[in-house]
Image (cartoon, rainbow, N blue to C red):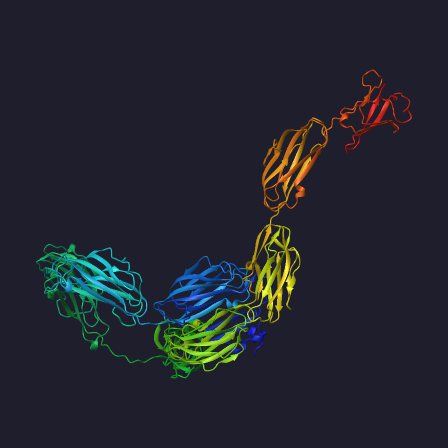
Amino acid sequence: MLSRKRILKQLYNPNFYNSKIKYKDLLIHHATISKKSHLIFITRPIFMKYLLTIVFFIFTWTTVYGQTTDLSTTVEAQDLTGSSISQAHFYERYTYLVTISNTGAPVSNADFNLSLSSVNNIESAVAQNNLGGAVSPAAINILGSSIDGILPNMPNSSSIEILVTVRASPIFLGGATATVMVNPPVGTTDTNLSTNTSVISIIMTERPIDFQISQTQIIPVSNGSLTSWGDSVTYEMTILNNSGIEYPLQNFLIAAQNINGAGSAIVTLENLTCVSSNGMSCPTLSGINPTSSVNLTNQFEFYNHGEEIVFPAGASFTLSIRYKVEEGDCSRLTPNQPLKIGNRISIQSYINNTGFNTSNLIDTDALLNTSCPCTDLTAQVDKVSPTGGTLSAWTDIVTFDYTFTNNGPLDIIAGAYLINTSTLNTGIEILSVNCISTTGPINCSDINIVTTTDFRWLTDDFTFPSNSSITVRTTVRFIPPECTPNGIAPVCSMRGIVFENDNALIDCDLSNDYDGDSILGLPVTPCVDVPNNPIIEINEIQTIPTPGAGPYPYGNVTYEIVMSNVDSIAHHIKFKDIQFSQGTGILQSIICTGTTGGAACPSVLNENVGVVNAQGDTFWEILDTDGFIMPANSSVTYEKVIDWTPVCSVLPTNVQDNLEMSALDTSLSVIATASTGVATPMVPCVDLVVQTYPSITSAPINSPLEWIIDITNSNISTDANNIDFTDLLHPDFIITGTPSCSLITGTATCISSFSVSGNLIEGVIPYMESGSTIQVRIPVTSPSYGGSFENRAEAQPDFTQQGENTPDSNISISSLFVLTSQTSKSFNPPIINTGETSILTFILTNSVGLPAQDNITFIDNLPPEITLSGNAYWIDQNSASGTFIDTIGTSLIGIQNLSFPAGTQQVSFAVEVTSQEAGLYTNSFLNFTALNNIDVSTAFATLEVLPVLDLSINKTVDNLKPDVNGEVTFTILVENMGSATATDVIVEEFLPSGYNYVTHHTTTGTFDYLSGLWTVGDMVEGSNAMLQITVDLNIPGNFVNVVDVYSSNILPDINLENNTAIALTRPDCLKIPEGFSPNNDGINDTLVIECIELYPDSKLKIFNRYGSIVYEATEYINDWDGIPNKGLLHNSGEVLPVGTYFWQLDLNDGSEARVGWVYINH
């Protein structure tokens, strides 16, 4: 076996197809093939001579995180009942069932195409049987013999069928190939291109086609004659499809016909209608000629259907046509007889392989037309000069007078001509033609004469009055022939003919319409037989293969060419070798191998080596400008090799070249030529058709099934012998038994034994008669992992015996969709509040039979609102191993390279997730990417994240200690800090007694100061609203202003503590003077503190400048007159000295003590 390195080197070698690598050396051992390798087929039929099939696996490693998929397709031909077929007859309606599957990551906008080699039209294409979430294409485009479309979504483990109904061509016979391709969109890589194409072929067979046409005259009855002009005649015409199949007519036509020409009739189409049909609908008769009435002198087409009309087997329709027949032109027949008219219906069929009649004529006797009146035309030709009976010289000018006469009794439309009627190829030159005289009511100017100087003159049609004549003088010079037998003198003669061209008149006597005169020419050179004494010769013989042993296989034929100068002098030679047959030929080599007589090999052969030459092309040549000289009595010998590929035929076909050799004079004009050629018979063609498909289109892993291969030898083919059969299964199929071969139709010899090497099956079909089909069935077990897996079948003729008509149909490719492990997933709990957590669990269930699984990979792309809040962990590991993809804070969770042993039913793992945004989140098969060996089509879970309500309220005041009767402004801010909309939000703002409302401002809603309710309305999450209230305070004291917020939302508020807010104010009327004068004058004698009575628990302290307390009072009542009750002077009974003192007043209400100074003045 060759190394991979050498195989790769050979594949990229431009001379690869001429190398000596054997076919089997190119099959890389299956055990080394990656399960995700690409299978590439390179097939090159070298003109159907050497078909070399290379099967080559290229390893492709794909990254888990890449944008990939694995699409595959199969196609199967079926009849209208859904049964598989390998043959269909022409114009049959049948179907192609295309299955497109995806075993890789989900993919959107994949495109597909089906092209058919030989169908009349595609009638419909519909999507059906969508599985695993596959979405039907929005439109399937039908373009002639192909369809295409875009698949919006193909999830993992999904599939879709496209059912294409076609109508076979009405004429094509042989192999019809169907090719399906499916491709991912740009930017997505398909990990297994070998399953993206499927090719099958079926045979189109012939059936007998037989249409019958019949006509009946309905009116007059019993085929009666017309009784008077103006009567109508009615015919009924029936077209019947007497074939055993539905088949179309290209067209049908209806015409009225003047059968015997006894005058004419004015025929008017009065009615054309379909009166009945059987097994089909009446056709719409839209091809009626707009000219409905004609003077029927010959035949006139009144109806041309102009389009195809389909007849089911045994179907027919009947048309009725009615003509009105009126008298037309007079009858020109002598003796006169009744006019006979008829109706002709003609059909045009694509094929007439039974010889049925394509037209039918029915006739009806009309009436006797009036006989046409006649006049008598006569012609007379007289030689005027020379007067003698013989030319004196060939240069003599000869004058003829031609008189043509209308003897009456009627005017007539006529014409006349004078023509050379000389013997022995004597030519003529007309020197002059002149009208010289007339008689009766006609002038020379009434006629126009057109002259052909070497042949004749002819008048245009003119009105020839009765009892008139015209004389035309013609001068000619006769031109002698090159030679005559024994040199005899030719007779130089001219003949004049006058004729009528009038529909209403005839010539009474045709016998006098022509006349002539002549003069004897002079003797000329006798014609002598010159013996053939060639000066050059060219000969060609076939040397390889042996002549006479054909027909020969396509390919190289070797010839020997001998080019000879047999003259006694040297000659300048030019030469050309031309491809002279249908098909193609490629010049492989042309070599000068020898010379004689002093000749030298040409220095230039102008060869077109390696060029595909069609009929008329040049293989090689020696140009006149090449200056090739051959000495006298010399020769040059060449050896030529041509690679021939003839036009395919069921009979042996000749291929041939044509050799043209010329001798040239000094001016390069040809003075002698010689030519030759050899016809080589080539083998006839066969037309093999191969179709492969699995017995089921999808299967679980490790499941039994069969690969079926139908091989048909077309009915347009010749019998085939020794057909090479090969079938290459994907390496992961396991062949479980011996392949079988059975005869389906016709006569053929099945494969007696198969050679099985790995997954390559080979065999030889000894014989297949034209039109026969055999079937090979290969029992296999599906691969042990999921995906699409291809099979490639091929049948090639023995190219040493036969060619191949349609090489594309010799190969068929199909694939099987293998099911694998499935995964499911769920959230627990499935409903959480915003910010809470849920456990996402994945359960992987093994496929049927619980096989071992490995290399399972997937990534679940969670909705971005859901993130991982913990790492993944096993629930039921069951000896499984793999690498988790579980970065906290991201929305990606998956596993890479998961494997578990045989017998494992399930493995499962989980991860904690959370969400900060409310919503219902769907996590289905559409979320998966980077899939390998896993079916996620049933994976579906939802997580509902509930919104929460959290209203908060805050209240502030712009002045905590306003003066009594002063104003303050309260600001109230409401916010929705939850994830749900708060509905019907209301804030209660009840102002305490002592506050007087002044004004307010709100950003949202309305505030009623009388009720104390601020109606905010609905608040979406994250929104806020503000209310500002301005009040005045008419009494002092500590005031607590409480505000509350509420919502009618059915969701509970998760934090009631922030639903209430408080603002404190302390209106103050205390005023302590800065001095007083205790001198008993009755004015300002005591320290008076305004509003001190409001604070009965207050405590007042007075300090001197040294910080010593000099006065202290509890429940002060504005009675201190400056006399101390503390300190050194407390017993003096005297007012404190003049000066500044400091005070401290504690209201004992929880507020901070107040301090200040006061001045005592006596």
The quarter holding residue 545 reads bottom left
Left or right, 766 with reference to 320: right
Q: Residue furthest top?
A: 1081
Residue 49 visible (yes or no): no
Left or right, 1075 with reference to 1004: right
The quarter holding residue 893 reads bottom right
Question: Where is residue 586 drawn, in percent x and y?
Answer: 43, 74
Camera-side residue of 201 and 1109: 1109
Camera-side residue of 962 and 48: 962
Question: Where is residue 118 drawn, in percent x and y?
Answer: 39, 67
**Residue 649 against residue 405 in the figure, above or below:** below
Camera-side residue of 335 and 1074: 1074
* Quadrant where the N terminus is found in the figure: bottom right
Left or right, 462 with reference to 171: left
Residue 743 visible (yes or no): yes
**Residue 1056 against residue 784 in the figure, above or below:** above
Question: Where is residue 187 drawn, in percent x and y?
Answer: 55, 60
The quarter holding residue 324 reads bottom left
Question: Where is residue 348 drawn, in percent x and y?
Answer: 28, 65
Q: Residue at x 21, y 77 (%)?
A: 485
